Amino acid sequence: MKVVILAGGFGTRISEESQFRPKPMVEIGGMPILWHIMKVYSHYGFNDFIICAGYRQHVIKEWFADYFLHTSDVTFDFTKGNEIIVHRKHVEPWKVTIIDTGLNTQTGGRVKRIKDYVGNETFMLTYGDAVGDINVRELLEYHQSHGKIGTVSVYNFSQNKGVLELSSSGDVEAFREKSDQDDDMINIGFMVFEPDLFDYISGDDIIFEKEPMNGLVCDHQLMGYVHKGFWQCMDTLREKEKLERMWESGNAPWKLWHNQ
């Protein structure tokens, strides 16, 4: 099953870092947050990734092209015609497809542009700027159990994010901006969709969190999977530093894997 990651935005709220590279390439513990997200999925056996790139997309492509250099010990022997010897080469079990989905394309448009790469099959979708200890295998099983087009992971989080209202059965009844009356149940990404989702996206200028999501709500085709563990976005430098401190202290709840 393919995992689609939105990684094409400008990241203006963390411009201290994103002026030099896409926000998903901002590092936590010496590795891009994009890598951390992929490691979470890989821990559960999902290793086929489609990255929706845009702003400074060449940075993402070049990083993966040189991945073995980032993760291995290397000898550059200039006495033998610039020979490169890779020691203790570490290779992830990943297939990574990086698509330039446009510089100014909105989130919905980016998803629409990778339709042919997903094909006619169920796929996962998430944002490239947040980590959590989401059990994505359990998430998929929940999605398959209800038979609807989409499932979003929801989380009680006290920030001004998009808010979902859930019925007692798990149906999403509203998808809107937060108000003072809300109890902060938000969409945290880590979503699963059927290919019917593409019918709800008309073009590049569509914001995924508006027309497509609201369309699914109106058609009673969106369910919420409640996550009660850890989750943290990286919208600001302060949040980046928080994640960095957690990683360096050895207390990073999203580190579900045991190697590296």
Image (cartoon, rainbow, N blue to C red):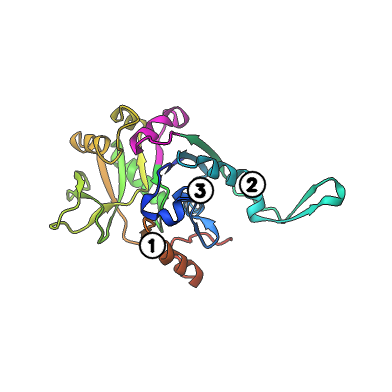
Residue depicted at 41% across the width and 38% down the height: 123
Secondary structure category for the residue under label 1: helix
Which label is found at residue 239?
1
Q: Which quadrant of the rendered structure holds the C terminus?
A: bottom right
* Residue projecting furthest to the right: 79
Which label is found at residue 45?
3
The answer to whether residue 148 is left or right of residue 259 is left
* Residue bearing mark 2: 66
107 and 167: which one is in front? 107
Secondary structure category for the residue under label 3: loop
Residue depicted at 54% across the width and 44% down the height: 59
**In the image, what residue type sits under mark 1?**
Glu
Quadrant position of residue 114 = top left
Label 3, residues with CA under 10 Å away: few <14, some 14-19, many ≥20: some
- The image shows residue 210 at horizontal and vertical percentages of 25, 39
Label 2, residues with CA under 10 Å away: few <14, some 14-19, many ≥20: few
Q: What stretch is highlighted in magenta?
A: 101-124
- The image shows residue 149 at horizontal and vertical percentages of 30, 35
**In the image, what residue type sits under mark 3?**
Gly
Marks 3 and 1 sit apart, C-alpha to C-alpha, by: 28 Å
